[in-house]
Image: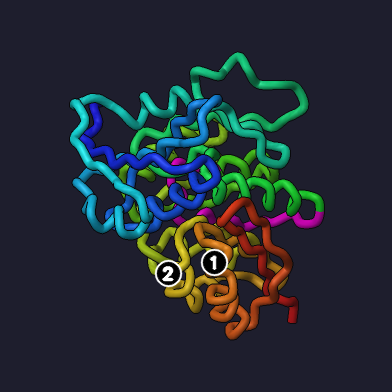
Amino acid sequence: MTAPPLWKASVTVPKARAGNVMALFELAPPEPQAVLVVEDPFGPDSTVEALYETPPDAEALTQLIGARVTVAPLPDQDWIRVSQLGLPPVRAGRFFVYGAHDAGAVPPGVTPIRIEAGLAFGTGHHETTSLCLEALSDLKRVQNPYAILDLGCGTGVLAIACAKLWRRTMIATDIDAIAVETARENTRINNVAPLVRTAVADGFGAPAIRDRAPFDLIAANILARPLTELAPALSAALAPGGTAILSGLLRNQEALVLSYYRNLGLVFVRAYRDGPWSALVLTRPRR
């Protein structure tokens, strides 16, 4: 199926700024469908490009980034998939995340996850996804969760990782039906479909989540604002001794997010960081 027509916003900045500019594109409305960097290996600059379903405000982005942002429509083809064909595989913790075009590049001694993103977020290339995969790899050494939830699953990469680590049945939910369908297809590709129940759900009120709570592990790679808004429900859904992995936030948002969960009795364990991005690990003490 061909994706909807897209718009591309692009800006050229010094290479040292590319990571921060990617973060700004991710956070500024409207939400981009993909963000990528095009670099000249011998030059000082990088071009950061973001793809959108609706045209973004070029002037607002220019003011936010501090460099001229251009916006133009793209021809009607699946540019998200085209952009992903140029993405290299990702090594995160014990995981090796790759697309179909890299199927022959899986090295020995890793846990492979093949992801076809379509219009969903989460290929492993974004820092927040790879940070969550690192956190899950480390958690495998100390915890054996029984009930697991991937909230805001996107492509399903975290649910697939959990299924391969613990071989448990679990739930993967997203508010976006396209993401849920993408996640369902990726679980099939990775031979874990019987272990992952997918559902469209907004927050914790959906029967698919409510009927399985409390959870020993909740992974929520979303954004800082929904993480704070969902703090009471997420904390209530976490079992004593359970672990929450929260990501989709910047380093300078850590204190804000932590304040909400600490007030609800959760205890900070550690932070994983990469550039401006962060993933937080918290636990609910056993009574």
Mark 2 and mark 1 residues within 8 Å of each other at the beta carbon: no
Q: Name the magenta segment's main secondary structure.
A: loop
- Asked which quadrant contains residue 76, the reply is top left
Is residue 104 a member of the stretch shown in magenta?
Answer: no
> Does residue 152 appear left or right of residue 28 in this picture?
right
Q: Point out the image quarter for the C terminus.
A: bottom right
| Label 1 environment density (alpha carbons within 10 Å; few <14, some 14–19, many ≥20) | some
> Does residue 272 appear left or right of residue 214 in this picture?
right
Assign a secondary structure to mark 1. Answer: loop
- Asked which quadrant contains residue 205, the reply is bottom left
Residue placed under numbered mark 1 in the picture: 213
From this viewpoint, which residue is outermost toward the top?
104
Earlier residue among tags 2 and 1: 1
Q: Toward the viewer: 202 or 47?
A: 47
Assign a secondary structure to mark 2. Answer: helix
Which residue corresponds to the image point at 55% horizontal and 68% vertical from the top-left?
252
Q: Is residue 176 above or below residue 268?
A: above
Q: Which range is magenta?
A: 142-157
Counting from the top left corner in percent of width and height, residue 12 is at: 39, 40
Which residue corresponds to the image point at 42% horizontal and 34% vertical from the top-left?
117
Q: Is residue 76 above or below residue 198?
A: above
The amino acid at mark 2 is Arg
Which residue corresponds to the image point at 63% horizontal and 17% vertical from the top-left?
105
Q: Nearer the viewer, mark 2 or mark 1?
A: 2
The amino acid at mark 1 is Ala
Residue placed under numbered mark 2 in the picture: 225
Q: Toward the viewer: 163 or 42?
A: 42
From this viewpoint, which residue is outermost toward the right?
141
Counting from the top left corner in percent of width and height, residue 182 is at: 39, 37
Cα–Cα span, label 2 and label 1: 23 Å
